[in-house]
Image (cartoon, coloured by chain):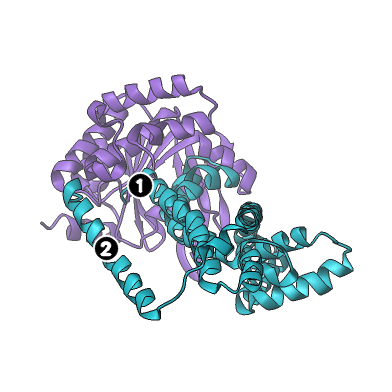
Amino acid sequence: MNLWLDRVTKSFDGQAVLNEVSLRLDQTHTLVLIGPSGGGKTTLLRIIAGLEHPDTGEVVINDEALIFEEESLLKHRRSVGTVFQAFNLFPHLTALQNVTLPLEKVHGYSPTEAGEIARQLLARFRLEGHTSKQPAELSGGQRQRVAIARAVAIKPKLLLFDEPTSALDPEMTAEVLDVIQELRAEGRDLVLVTHEMGFARQAADQIAVLVEGRIVEFGPGAQVLENPQSERCREFLARVLKY
Amino acid sequence: MPPPWPLRLVNLGAAFFLIVLLFYFSFHQLNYHWNWASIYEYRAKFVQGWITTILISASSLGLSTGIGLFFALAQRSRWLALRYFSKIYIEIVRGTPLLVQILIFFYVVADAFHVENRYLVGILTLACFSGAYISEIIRAGIESVGKSQLESAKAIGLTRAQTYRFVIFPQALRQTLPPLAGQFVSLIKDSSLLSIISISEFTLNAREVNSSTFSTLESYIPLAIGYLLLTLPISMWTRHLEKRHRFNT
């Protein structure tokens, strides 16, 4: 993917969350956003997902500028897959229906085609025995894999993950990270907000570190984590890598 | 786990027996001389009134659901005037007696708009009355659906209408069914107030039978049973629906 951010600014109630964030990625598969809580990672991801309007600034994805008005944002949201921290599956639908709903109602697949695609994906994510269960009957890791299947099913140009493992225990975290690693290996384009430093190191082509609404460090994964240039980033890494 | 059916049957029988006993004792103490024969002659009048009540209730039930849905959505509308209009309508209707509403509707509003058919006026009044309550029930149901659900719907690219259709309504339905059933039951009973504009529904007919025969209890006990026959199935049906739409959160 090519992802350009040009002086993206966003504030909530006068509180600046993103402060002129600029970034240029060319031909990169995986961008990982890290940083302390409240640093603006999630807001940035939500802007890229088309769920939030920036106050000023420009976002260009694969040479196409996002137009921040409802109609084109709707189109944009239909072309990306977003996975949230809290799963956000629909509790009244089964795992299978959760995946087929956007396929049928948004992307115009027939019920048979949609069912076929969903079943294949769920099987691939080792959920074949759980297709007719409702989210409440699934474990956290299973739910998150269903959510990933829902996001992947529509063949998005970009997959966005907002702290997909923060609500999971280590074992389930591993299940979910395995799936994300698989998608990465396929060469899909991902933007990932995470607190898992080990995973960030493994998966990231590029890492951006956001502190207080600014990108304080940006570069190839290994370089950012092992040889950070900025004081802010060193402080942050020292804190999270302490234990 | 529900208890096994023989146990349920025995307990149901015991509860029923207790209630029958209570009523039997009360009536026995009264030393009342029953005169069912005189009532039996008026059976056609009861049946006719009962059917009228069914027709009026069913019509206003359907209509009030539509009205309720409209005002529930209007309260979430982007137009402020529409939101205020719904709020005012709901507060006025819920805050004033149905009796007054029926009289004003019939003698003032219907007269101004040249609606002559009193049955139509009755149905409309009842629908407006019940619609205000139903609108609040539906609004509460819609608001019970979490923010994260709306976010999810947005993220997968559903339009506003699709979000209501596939995400909000199915989830709100379960929250809505029990109070909605209660409201429908009330609506059926409230239809008895239409007797004041001489709509010959169940209650008015029973009253007329009473004044012709002077057999008060014999006139009104069938009335109670007739209403129960309508309201009980509604309760049972919604309980069944509730089970069908159950999901865990």
Three-letter code for the amino acid on which mark 2 is drawn: Phe
| Residue A201 appears in the picture as rendered | yes
Q: Are marks 2 and 1 in contact (CB under 8 Å)?
A: no
Badge number at residue B118? none
Q: Nearer the viewer, residue A204 or B237?
A: B237
Task: Check disc 1 and give the amino acid type.
Answer: Lys
Rendered hue of chain B is cyan
Pointer 2: what residue?
B17
In this picture, residue B66 sits left or right of residue A124: right
* Numbered disc in front, either 2 or 1: 2
The numbered mark 1 sits on a residue in which chain?
B
Q: Which residue is mark 1?
A: B243
Cα–Cα gap, marks 2 and 1? 29 Å
- Mark 2 / mark 1, whichever is N-terminal: 2
Q: Secondary structure at mark 1?
A: helix
Which residue is at the far left? A243
Per the rendering, the colour in which chain A appears is purple
Q: Are marks 2 and 1 on the same chain?
A: yes
Residue B141 appears in the rendering: no
Is residue A91 or residue A14 the one in the foreground?
A: A91
Give the letter of the chain under mark 2.
B
Residue B135 placement (x, y as % from top left): 58, 62
Q: Secondary structure at mark 2?
A: helix
Q: Would you place residue B195 above or below residue B74 in this image?
A: below
Left or right, A46 with reference to B204: left
Depth check: give the residue in front, B71 or A57.
B71
Q: Residue B144 versus residue B101: which sits nearer the camera?
A: B101
Q: How many marks?
A: 2
For label 2, count other residues whose C-alpha is less than 10 Å away and answer few (under 14), some (14-19) or many (20+): few
Q: Position of residue B106 (x, y in %)?
A: 78, 70
Quadrant housing residue A120 = top left
Label 1: few (<14), some (14–19) or many (≥20) C-alpha neighbours in 10 Å: few
